[in-house]
Image (cartoon, grey):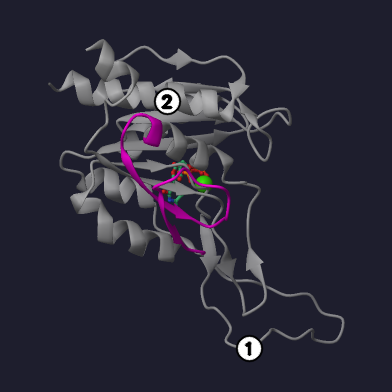
Amino acid sequence: KLRQIQGTSLEGQHYLVTAGGTREYLDPVRYIGNRSSGKMGYAIAQALTEAGAKVTLISTVNLKVPVGTEVISVQSALEMQAEIDKLFPQSDGLVMAAAVADFRTAEVATQKIKKNQNQGLDLQLTQNPDLVATFGAKKQNQKVIAFAAETNDLIEHAQTKLQKKHADLLVANDVSRTDRGFGVDQNQVTILEPGQPNETLPLLSKIETARLIVQRIIKLSVGEN
Ligand code: CTP
Ligand code: CA
């Protein structure tokens, strides 16, 4: 059991990890984006690899990956969904660290949108599907790990998301503070699990945070045996 917890405990398992903020194009040159750097997703990929899992990163950014990691590049939420869809049924789990845009333009213009006199531009936005909720509802034996980015009432909002997304774990992030979370190398999170007490981790580097999240993922799989 000790060996399981330490090194090769996810040997033979295949995890999908999404990372980065999605880009929702308005036209061929412009997009709506967000502040996610993708670092947390890549740290999770690294920690899963260290635990012996095979990892496929479905990513909007281009950071250094652990040896052996397969990377699938995507831009929009719908592209990300299509790639997860292909691999999810055969996988052992999905970690949704990506910052999926909640909205996309109803239509993507095929030509660059031109300025018109001195006028502004009205964008019609439509809601993207909630990817993690969709896969959470479809899961068979896969573990589904969601994140939550909150600026206020962290635990209350995170608890609602844990249920709504049918997640096995939810990693809650306070994004109102500039010394942790978006773009920087350290993070401070609280891990929620149905029926378990919340675990608040100290302020740590993203890789240390990722390793502790992966310990919780290992516990989920070990708990079943
Ligand atoms: N997520 C997703 N698909 C979306 C939006 C979010 O899969 N269209 C996932 C994120 O990858 C993350 C989790 O849902 O794992 C929570 O994202 P968050 O933005 O905090 O929550 P939302 O449900 O989008 O709610 P809101 O932004 O309104 O707080
Ligand atoms: Ca959102």
Q: Residue at x 68, y 73 (%)?
A: 122
In magenta segment, residue 56: yes
Residues drawn in magenta: 49-75
In magenta segment, residue 76: no
Q: Is residue 129 left or right of residue 42?
A: left
Q: What residue type is disc 2 on? A: Ile
Ranked by sequence position, the earlier of labels 1 and 2 is 1
Image coords of residue 219 (percent x, y): 28, 20
Q: Is residue 150 above or below residue 155?
A: below
- In-front residue for pair 150/187: 187
Q: What residue type is disc 1 on? A: Gln
Image coords of residue 105 (percent x, y): 55, 70
Q: Tag 1: Cα neighbours inside 10 Å, few (<14), some, or many (≥20)?
A: few
Q: Answer with the quarter of the image where residue 111 lies.
A: bottom right
Residue behind mark 2: 213
Q: Is residue 114 above or below residue 79?
A: below
Q: Residue at x 48, y 28 (%)?
A: 210
Q: Is residue 151 left or right of residue 162?
A: right
Mark 1 to mark 2: distance in Å? 44 Å
Q: Is residue 155 above or below residue 95?
A: above
Q: Is residue 206 left or right of residue 142?
A: right
Q: Residue at x 19, y 19 (%)?
A: 223
Q: Is residue 87 above or below residue 167?
A: below
Please identify the quadrant where the N terminus is shown.
top left
Residue behind mark 1: 111
Please identify the quadrant where the C terminus is shown.
top left
Image coords of residue 54 (percent x, y): 31, 43
- In-front residue for pair 67/12: 67
What numbered label is drawn on residue 121? none
Kindly state the secondary structure of the residue where label 2 is placed: helix
Q: Report if residue 6 is visible in the image.
A: yes
- In-front residue for pair 110/90: 90
